[in-house]
Amino acid sequence: MSIDTIIRAAMDAGVELSYVDGQLLVTGKRRVLAVVKPQLRQYKAEIIAHLSAANDPEPSPDPTAWRELAEAYHLHHFQCPSCIAAGQGRGFRCGTGAAFWSTYQSAA
């Protein structure tokens, strides 16, 4: 199983993963975390490497690239109840929405 698959499965289950100040932060509902954490612990080093690489994106050569990313995110967002709720501060984005959002934010 690839690290992308493991991270996407965790995000789809409502778990948020982030790498801040040298620490892997895992948040979500307790019952979900109880199921997901053992697998995340098993691949902790690989997840940290993946997230730290994602935190250091290379600058986009096209200063207007964010517009295409924003459009892609918005096309998904307004069709997805999870992402709509997250935009209102009531939950987490789905795996697809989180990926779109992360890419959009890094380019903006």
Image (spheres, rainbow, N blue to C red):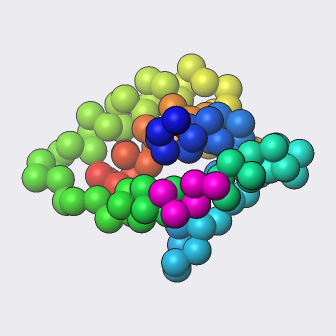
Please give the name of the residue rendered at 54% of the width and 72% of the height, measured from the top-left corner.
20
- Toward the viewer: 96 or 80? 96
Residue 45 colored magenta? yes
Residue 29 in percent (x, y) is at 83, 49
Q: Vertical placement of 22 versus 4: above or below?
A: below
In this picture, residue 4 sits left or right of residue 24: left
- Which quadrant of the figure has residue 65? top left
Give, as a single range, the part of the protein colored magenta.
42-46
Please give the name of the residue rendered at 81% of the width and 43% of the height, measured from the top-left corner.
35
Please give the name of the residue rendered at 43% of the width and 62% of the height, measured from the top-left corner.
49
Please give the name of the residue rendered at 74% of the width and 46% of the height, measured from the top-left corner.
36
Residue 32 colored magenta? no
Q: Vertical placement of 56 versus 71: above or below?
A: below
- Toward the viewer: 94 or 68? 94
- Toward the viewer: 4 or 84? 4
Furthest toward the right, the residue is 31
Q: Vertical placement of 55 versus 15: above or below?
A: below
In this picture, residue 52 sits left or right of residue 16: left
Q: Vertical placement of 7 versus 71: above or below?
A: below
- Toward the viewer: 17 or 106? 17
In this picture, residue 34 sits left or right of residue 90: right
